[in-house]
Amino acid sequence: MSADAYTIHPIAHICTDFKDKFGIPRQSGLVPELTGRIVFEPEYRDPNALVGLEGYSHLWLIWQFSTVAAEYAAGKSWRPTVRPPRLGGNVRRGVFATRSPYRPNALGLSCVELVGVDGGDLLVKGADLLDGTPIFDIKPYLPYVDAHPDARGGFTEQTAGYGLTVECAPELLTKVPKEKQAALLGVLQNDPRPGYQHDPQRVYTLDFGANKVRFTVAGKTLQVQEIL
């Protein structure tokens, strides 16, 4: 190991409704109804570490794109330029001008709402993480320094308001647990498709919790075809 290499260990992992990366919101907070449970590893499961946490409404999570890390371990390397999906998948930007998972250390950063503490676990909302994602650190969100209302959003400003109209028959939606229905609709509204796919005949399948959701997209309308 070189002198400038460091080893960090997960302190926790998160449980979410996403067993596959398809459908995960592209940013935290886009679908505030999404719920998650942060489960600490045994050596960090100390209630003293959470004293005072109830005074904060939001948290920063520092985590790893675990699927990308596995690709790196298999020989794949990071990319100096990437093609952001919201730009159609054809325009390249520097990796440090994006939040692409294909970064040198495959680290992610998410801001989530803290709902509460349950038996030593943290209940959060608005997470954009795959189920089982390792978390390296948790820090409180400080609105007086972390919020910058006048900040510029770069190329994302042209796509920030993008969304689809979701059509789903009520009898289909009832197949999803009632407490998760709003979260599912939010995920679909944010358009889970890769930015370069626009075939109105293509049927997509989204794994969401215990359900499989099949849908098509024509123009700016997403039509749910089936929920299993």
Image (cartoon, grey):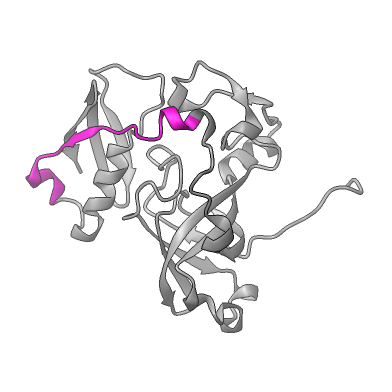
Q: Taking 211 as reference, is 120 left or right? A: right
Tell me the magenta residue range. Answer: 156-174
Q: Quadrant of residue 219?
A: top left
Q: Report the front residue among 133 and 56.
A: 56
Whether residue 9 appears in this view of the structure is yes
Q: Residue at x 13, y 51 (%)?
A: 174
Q: Residue at x 48, y 48 (%)?
A: 149
How many badges with numbers are in the image?
0
Q: Residue at x 42, y 77 (%)?
A: 118
Whether residue 211 appears in this view of the structure is no
Q: Residue at x 61, y 78 (%)?
A: 49
Above or below, 208 relative to 42: above
Q: Report the front residue among 135 and 219.
A: 219
| Magenta stretch encompasses residue 118 | no
Q: Taking 108 as reference, is 176 left or right? A: left
Residue 176 in the image: x percent, y percent? 20, 52
Residue 76 in the image: x percent, y percent? 68, 30
Residue found at the very far front of the displayed protein:
150
Above or below, 94 relative to 227: above
| Magenta stretch encompasses residue 158 | yes
Q: Taking 200 as reference, is 9 left or right? A: right
Residue 181 in the image: x percent, y percent? 22, 52
Residue 85 in the image: x percent, y percent? 46, 26
